[in-house]
């Protein structure tokens, strides 16, 4: 959500107007040049260009090239006229436009963009992307195709975040640019063979199919932001080097999830209610993923009628993508991302929290910054991370950007875990001497204690 409104509508209108005028002038100029040329494109064969050559052209000095449908385009002179801003177009520099246009479908729907692009064509790919040949010896070869606009920190397993230029486009993050945090290869599951086992201490064991979840329970819808526990670690690295992935602030995304209430599954199928919790001294509910990952949440969160924990099978109106947990994942609003286990095939009640490094290791626990070694620290019995703290970030202007305007629009996001809503966001441009209160945008009108 934006945490600061525009200083005036004119400020927003002028750059858009100039961009459109620039784009139109640019197109007219190229069309006119083509008409006046004695040897238009039909007269000369297209140059063959390799994908490696395209990848080398990512700056104005060398030229900015992109590909689209196996053709190559030089967009160097158009970048500054791009109506969506040059930053967006630069995300595709040296790469393919196709996956970006799948998100911004207005490019093809309105017809102007293909016409402009046509005038910038300089050749065709000599080596179009061949069909992928899988090597059965590498378990990661079957992983899904990923959007090239993501910022990749690892590929095996995949860990990637959304760039700032895409985070502010919409409160709901498109599925294709949702941040990715994997620990293992992506499981591939036949939905007809899928089974969810619900069992554990004090529970009546039950096995459910995907159809059971979709047809035998009331569908619940929850809109929530999920954030990796290491989000923004790179900012800490500037002060002192840490261990772990150097995330920017893109390891968080928002989606509308559809699924079934975990509380209703536990109560009405497995017979786990407040009485069973007290009698068996239940403390945790553990989620087991088909990627051999497990994590747990407090039983109070799982059974809280206002807690909104669901077993989700849809994401932003579509079936869960394999990348994000198909066919079923846990969605635990307001809680650190690692507890939102993907590819869940077992839910278990327990006196103890989940075992393994993602629950009992050092990665998802809080320690003093003075702790440099864990030889004398009881890591396993240190409280595990659950609810996330309040935070905010400025996404526009970008860090170290030079701004020459008299007034500046500052945009970003603010979020707090545990369902705690954002009351106010203040912005300072003079190191805290004075503050301007921002206008809260999408996401501000959420139910108290459920501002996920």
Image (tube, rainbow, N blue to C red):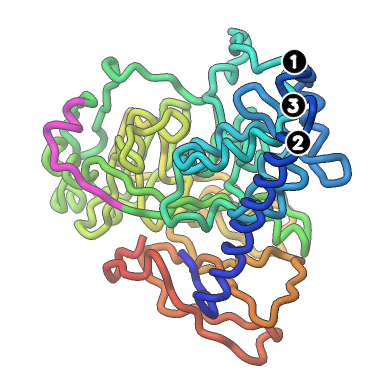
Q: Are marks 3 and 2 in contact (CB under 8 Å)?
A: no
Q: Where is residue 411 in the image (x, y as percent from the top left)?
A: 56, 69
Q: Which residue is drawn at 22% across and 41% down?
A: 260
Magenta stretch, residue numbers: 211-222
Question: Residue 181 versus residue 442: which sits nearer the camera?
Answer: 442
Contact between labelled residues 3 and 1, with CB atoms less than 8 Å apart: no
Instruction: Please tell me whether mark 1 sits on a helix, a strand or a loop.
Output: loop
**CA–CA distance in space, label 1 to label 3:** 22 Å
* Among the 4 quarters of the image, the one containing residue 38: top right
Q: Residue at x 58, y 74 (%)?
A: 11
Rendered position, 384 above or below 356: below
Q: Which of 278 and 316 is in front in this view?
A: 316
Res. 126 mark: 1
> Residue 393: percent from the left, percent from the top?
58, 66
Which numbered mark, 3 or 2, is in the foreground of this view?
Answer: 2
1 or 3: mark nearer the eye: 3
Instruction: From the viewer's perspective, tell me whether residue 164 is left or right of residue 438.
Output: right
Question: Who comes first in sequence, dot 1 or dot 3?
Answer: 3
Q: Is residue 231 in view from this perspective?
A: no
**Residue 433 in the image: x percent, y percent?**
67, 91
**Cα distance in 3D space between marks 2 and 1:** 29 Å
Label placed on residue 40: 3
Look at 13% across and 38% down and name the residue there: 217
* Quarter location, residue 63: top right
Q: Where is residue 216 in the image (x, y as percent from the top left)?
A: 11, 33
Characterize the local packing of mark 2: few (<14), some (14-19) or many (20 or more) Cα atoms within 10 angstroms.
Answer: few
For label 3, count other residues whose C-alpha is less than 10 Å away and answer few (under 14), some (14-19) or many (20+): few
Outermost right residue: 61
Which residue carries the number 2 mark?
Answer: 36
Q: Distance between the residues labelled 3 and 2?
A: 8 Å
**Mark 2 falls on what kind of element?**
helix
Q: Does the magenta stretch include residue 213?
A: yes
């Amino acid at each position: 959500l934006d945490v600061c409104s525009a200083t005036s509508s004119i400020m927003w209108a002028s750059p858009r107007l100039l961009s459109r005028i620039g784009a139109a002038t640019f197109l007219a100029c190229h069309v006119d040049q083509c008409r006046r040329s004695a040897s238009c494109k039909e007269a000369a064969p297209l140059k063959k260009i390799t994908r490696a050559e395209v990848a080398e052209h990512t700056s104005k000095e060398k030229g900015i090239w992109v590909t689209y449908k196996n053709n190559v385009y030089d967009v160097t002179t158009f970048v500054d006229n791009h109506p969506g801003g040059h930053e967006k177009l630069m995300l595709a520099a040296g790469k393919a436009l196709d996956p970006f246009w799948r998100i911004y479908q207005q490019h093809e729907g309105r017809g102007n963009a293909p016409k402009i692009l046509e005038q910038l064509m300089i050749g065709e790919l000599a080596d179009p992307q061949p069909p992928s040949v899988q090597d059965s010896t590498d378990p990661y070869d079957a992983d899904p195709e990923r959007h090239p606009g993501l910022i990749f920190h690892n590929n095996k397993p995949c860990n990637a975040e959304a760039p700032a230029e895409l985070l502010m486009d919409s409160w709901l993050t498109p599925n294709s640019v949702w941040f990715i945090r994997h620990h293992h290869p992506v499981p591939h599951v036949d939905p007809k063979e899928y089974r969810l086992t619900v069992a554990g201490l004090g529970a009546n064991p039950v096995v459910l199919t995907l159809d059971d979840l979709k047809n035998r329970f009331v569908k619940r819808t929850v809109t929530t932001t999920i954030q990796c526990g290491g989000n923004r670690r790179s900012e800490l690295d500037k002060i002192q080097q840490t261990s772990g992935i150097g995330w920017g602030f893109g390891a968080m995304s928002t989606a509308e999830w559809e699924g079934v209430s975990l509380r209703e599954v536990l109560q009405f199928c497995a017979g786990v209610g407040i009485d069973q919790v007290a009698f068996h001294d239940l403390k945790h509910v553990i989620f087991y993923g088909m990627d051999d990952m497990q994590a747990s949440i407090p039983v109070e969160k799982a059974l809280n009628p206002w807690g909104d924990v669901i077993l989700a099978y849809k994401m932003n109106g579509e079936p869960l993508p394999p990348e994000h947990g198909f066919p079923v994942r846990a969605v635990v609003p307001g809680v650190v991302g690692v507890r939102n286990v993907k590819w869940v095939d077992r839910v278990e009640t327990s006196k103890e929290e989940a075992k393994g490094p993602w629950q009992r290791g050092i990665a998802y626990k809080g320690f003093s910054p003075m702790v440099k070694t864990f030889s004398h620290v009881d890591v396993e019995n240190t409280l595990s991370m659950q609810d996330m703290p309040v935070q905010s970030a400025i996404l526009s202007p970008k860090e170290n950007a030079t701004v020459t305007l008299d007034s500046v629009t500052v945009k970003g996001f603010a979020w707090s875990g545990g369902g705690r809503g954002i009351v106010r966001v203040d912005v300072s441009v003079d190191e805290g001497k004075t503050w301007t209160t921002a206008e809260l945008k999408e996401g501000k009108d959420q139910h108290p204690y459920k501002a996920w």
